[in-house]
Amino acid sequence: MRMYDIIMKKRSGLALSEEEIRWMITGYTKGDIPDYQMSAFLMAVYFKGMTDEETALLTDAMAKSGEQLDLSDLPGVKVDKHSTGGVGDKTTLIVAPVVAACGCTVAKMSGRGLGHTGGTVDKLESIPGTRTSLSKEEFLDVVRRTGIAVTGQSPNLAPADKKLYALRDVTATVDSIPLIAASIMSKKLAAGSDCIVLDVKTGSGAFMKTVEDSVLLAEKMVAIGVHNGKKIAALITNMDIPLGYQIGNSLEVEEAVRTLCGQGPKDLTEVSLALASQLLYLAGDGELDHCRKLAQDALNSGAALEKLAAMIEAQGGDADCVRHPEKLGRAPVEADVTAEKSGYITKMDSAGIGIAAMLLGAGRETKESEIDPLAGIILKKKTGDSVKKGEPIATLLTSDPAKVDAAKARFLEAVSVGRTAPEKKPLIFARVTEQGVE
């Protein structure tokens, strides 16, 4: 078998066989296939695409390129949730403890933030003492004891994906739906859960800018999950506006805790409950309406908050910061951003606001950048709200006063004010399952 022939076959728009796909991924992971040949293959996929079967086979080969987590010894139904990334998206901190409080087993691997998108691992590490680099044995032990654990991704999990993503990043082949789907789902398959819910963001702060493209990506990922025997569904959710009102690591922990206490903002609460309900439904806990009630009860009773506290304590963190989030502290520098004219906020570019938070120290411009856990933005107004000239629309927080001016300028670039209120968009655009789109 030759890589040259595989490249030519895909360049001609033909479907690859399972043998060809597995041979290629094994060879590239081992270093037997050079980057220049794999780059040519990726570009061929970019232009010619892949069938659902090809994408599922590619994903499975990537998942099996390294360590696979065996969760079979853990009790209950193992569930997982993945978000394609956004601004203010702290739903894992809510959804995971909610479904764990309802009896599901949550053994979740999460990533760090880069650029304008946040990462769950960074948020957890803003809680003093919390360890997110757990060995496999430690990770499974925490799950057994508490029913829930969230750790950083193992370097041995889907190593083919790491190599391929680095190559896609420098060859302009990142935004290929089959390659995005394979990248995300290879890690989900290797992580070993029975049920997966996908939160596919759409809009200015998301990777997929249109609902149509987000649905296509969701359909591809759901097809991969079904092909590999998983119970899976996806929600297409709005990321034209940041989710919630607090952006930044400790700020997002604080808002997640308030949501777990039933005092969170409506948009964050609604998306979190919808995702949790989907997971409980996939896990066999009843119809969606009943699962929604179970999730709501877990919030109302305080059981979900206690699950988060138990996980934090088991991972070495100060659980008192979950019960009393004011103990997380506050950044020493605060600066208000005020409206430049009166009217209605007609647009709030999520990516621009995420970049403003990054400039304050809440995110990473490069993988080597250090995070300021207290830095971030508290929104006072959101899209559709009326404002008066000079009225505060956000508060910027940082430990470095030199960072304020650039962040303020970037924030103002992201906000538009007009004479009339914009049309309100839904929080959840669609649900994608094995049966189709609804």
Image (cartoon, grey):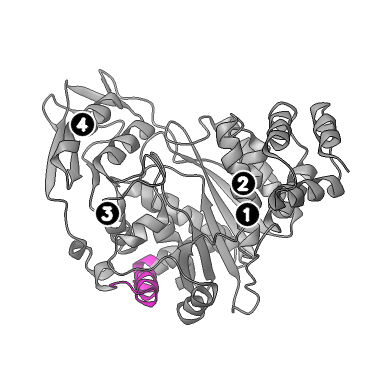
- In the image, what residue type sits under mark 2? Lys
Query: Marks 3 and 4, Cα distance to the nearest angstrom?
Result: 19 Å
Calculate the distance from the C-alpha at mark 4 to the C-alpha at mark 1.
39 Å
Q: Is residue 361 left or right of residue 57?
A: left
Tell me which corner region of the image, top left, top right, bottom left or bottom right, holds residue 158.
Answer: bottom right
**Residue at the far top in the pictured view:** 419
- Which quadrant of the rendered structure holds the N terminus? top right
Q: Which residue is mark 1?
A: 159
Q: Circle 3 sits on which residue?
A: 373
| Nearest to viewer (mark 3 / mark 2) | 2
Residue contact between numbered discs 2 and 1, judged by CB atoms under 8 Å: yes
Q: Residues within 10 Å of mark 2 (few under 14, many from 20)?
A: some
Asked whether the residues under the numbered discs 3 and 4 touch, taking CB atoms below 8 Å apart as contact, a structural biologist would say no
Q: Amino acid at mark 1?
A: Pro
Measured from the top left, where is residue 11 in percent x and y? 80, 27
Queried whether the magenta region covers residue 277, the answer comes back as: no
Helix, strand or loop at mark 3:
loop
* Nearest to viewer (mark 1 / mark 3): 1
| Observer able to see residue 209 | yes
The mark that comes first in sequence, 3 or 4, is: 3
In this view of the protein, which residue sits in the foreground, 258 or 207? 207
